[in-house]
Amino acid sequence: MGHDPAPAPPAQLTRRGLLAATAALPAAALLPGCSGDRRRRTSGGRITLRFQSLAWQQDSLAANRHLVAEWNRQHPTVQVRYVQASWSTVHDQLLTSFEGGEAPDIIHDATDDLADFAHGGDLADLTALLPPRLRRDIPQRTWETATFDGRIHGVPFLQEPRVLIANRAKLRRSGVRLPTPEDPWNWEEFAHAARRLTRGTAHGVAWPLKEPVSATLNLALSTGGRMFHRHPDGRAEVRFDAVDQVVPRTIHDQVNVDRSASRTTLGMGGSDTLPGFFAGRCAMVPLGFSYRQQIVQQAPGGFDWTVLPAPEGTTPDQGVSPQTLSIAADCPHKEVAMAFIDFLLRPPHMVRLALGDWLLPTGREALRDPALRTARYDWATGTALASTLRAAPAQSVRGYPEWKDKVATPGLQEYYSGAIDLDALKERLVGDGNLVLARYQR
Amino acid sequence: MSGNESGPTGDASTVRRRTATTRTRRRGVAPTARRTATRTGQYAALLAYLAFLAFPFLWLLSTAFKPPREIGSLHPTWIPEAPTLENFRQAFAEQPLWAAAGNSLLAAAVSALLAIALATPMAYVLARCRTRLSRAATGWVVISQAFPLVLVIIPLFLILKGLHLVDSRTGLILVYVVWSLPFALWMLTGYVRAVPAELEEAAAVDGAGRLRTLLSVTAPLLAPGIVATALFAFLTAWNEFFFALVLLKSPGKQTLPVALTHFLGTEGVADLGPLAAAALLATLPSLLLFAVIQRRITGGMLAGAVKN
């Protein structure tokens, strides 16, 4: 170009502009609705507690919100704020909340998620806070699901047995005996029934094993399988003995040997198997009890289904991780928070919460409610199984989540698909598994 | 010389062009057919790509209007057999979606504006002052994009807590600005470099001062780049989930992506109908924004500005 170059951009001006812009940032604090309100305010003697709920189904949400409103109406000096959270993100959210000292006062979670928070001192010990009525109402075996190092860190209030959802018409046609809670199938009978129900491309059973670990461990309790064993000094060890192997081997053989189980559903979640179930592609699907709600919503008109108890081994027991209500360790009003929990878990309220989530309550009195004893949607079948539910053996073990994600999930998935054999699975679960646990027990 | 110029004195390129035209006329239909086939192939590929891109959205749209029985069918259909608005009714009854959408809109719009306000002068400096320091700064900006969320979330949480900005929209907006600033800066630096410095020099020769040059010459030419960058910053904040999940506690302040997770239950079970309806609401603003603004993003505004 022919003309003189323009003067160099005056950096001063730019710097000044930048500084001004940077200095203007705090002005953003004047944006509407900016100031975060202080939590757990105590003003003029009025206490405000935050209750973080994981309710997600329409009826359950309505029940929770209604009960919170009812409490607030009855207790003008102790107000509870309902905070919605989600099952899919609750662990991460609680982790950061505890780290930052911003956790909600009353926390809805499940026992298999509590171990690290309990050991880390994030959750209050409820042992001395529990009202006698609540303590008596929930069976000791259920309290054990939320007990860590002898301290109760959550009130278990809803639980879900695993059941077999079955196509009743197919079962009748096959001529197999229909199991009942009083007389369930054993694992051999179950395998035989699955073979009888297999016709052409229609399988006897479809195992949705996207998350294979909890299903395998909880059902293995029926054959005496614990997989996690505690030494007298409190250290945990993984073993994979003959009693632990019955359930995994049954599933493996159904998929790979007699083909009575569908291979394609191994990587699916429970909901994913339902369309095939409705279309007659399989006769039985092992699922959680609450899946009945989806079946009621989605099943084609006239579809005849029923709930069967899960197979039993030496005992009818199965492991569960009940939903819990806990109190944060830094909650300044623990007694008041416990009073709210006690209110929320009064028998009629517990029944409402259970019906809303299509789950079983843990309280003895709630379990006697006629609404949960009806044959409609097989509520009675589930209620009859309540006495067989025990603490899942793994959930109190530190390092279990890592063992589950890094060792057991890929190992079981490969075993069920036929990629590895039982010895290779054992080597992984025990060999690699104990290495993982060792890091948590130094 | 104009290409249209003819005559015996035409240059070599004119002669070549004329020869080619004559050859085409002689050969007749063949090149036309080849061109048509090529064009058809291009359109077919484009349509296939559009179908690939549109499939998730169209399926979401279809699911949002289906009753539960159709959602769970083994033989799903594109068009709902019994279309229903029940999913929308349920979604809005269960979760405060309008409030969540408002919160998302506020956070996304304000953070995008702030990011642009900060990044534009910075980008100008980085683009025009090509020193070792500015190159190092640009490199650092790009590297900082590689930091994973989980690395910063707890320190960030503690810093914001110290500033009393946890559970505050301001805190979230500040985080979004900081999070989108490096990439916005990097994008804008490229756009500034695309504006020829000679234009600014010409303005200076015509007597325009530095500020006048920036406002009257550079800024209009940067507009498409600024719009594109603002759109990026807006969508980053609109879709962001993890910071909003961790930093906002009050139900009234939650953003739309966080509200969507409330339709998910244990073990990945989902209330698919209401979730699809709510997800559709979350998707529409992005689509509308792109539809309105896309023309502004197109390049070529600088074509012919300077004859080199």
Image (tube, rainbow, N blue to C red):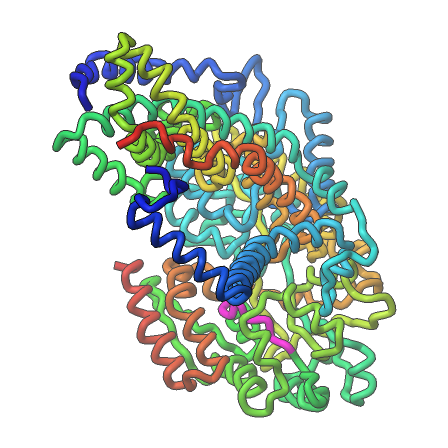
Corner quadrant of residue B280? top right
Q: Residue at x 41, y 63 (%)?
A: A405
State the residue in front, A149 or B275.
B275
Tell me if I can see residue A21 in this picture.
yes
Q: Is residue A68 above or below residue B73?
A: above
Question: Percent x, y for residue B271?
Answer: 67, 52
Tell me if I can see residue B154 in this picture.
no
Q: What residue range appears in magenta?
A: A206-213
Q: Is residue A372 left or right of residue A47?
A: right
Q: Is residue A286 above or below residue A251?
A: above
Corner quadrant of residue B306? top left
Question: Percent x, y for residue B266?
Answer: 59, 55
Question: Percent x, y for residue A352?
Answer: 75, 47
Outermost residue toward the front?
A: B8
State the residue in front, B34 or B222.
B34
Question: In the image, is residue A210 part of the stretch drawn in magenta?
Answer: yes
Outermost residue toward the left?
A: B132
Q: Residue at x 76, y 60 (%)?
A: B70
State the residue in front, B294 or A441.
B294
Question: Percent x, y for residue B269?
Answer: 62, 57
Q: Is residue A134 above or below residue A417?
A: above
Q: Residue at x 79, y 61 (%)?
A: A296
Q: Dividing the image into 4 quarters, which one contains the N terminus of chain A?
A: top left
State the residue in front, A344 or A109.
A109
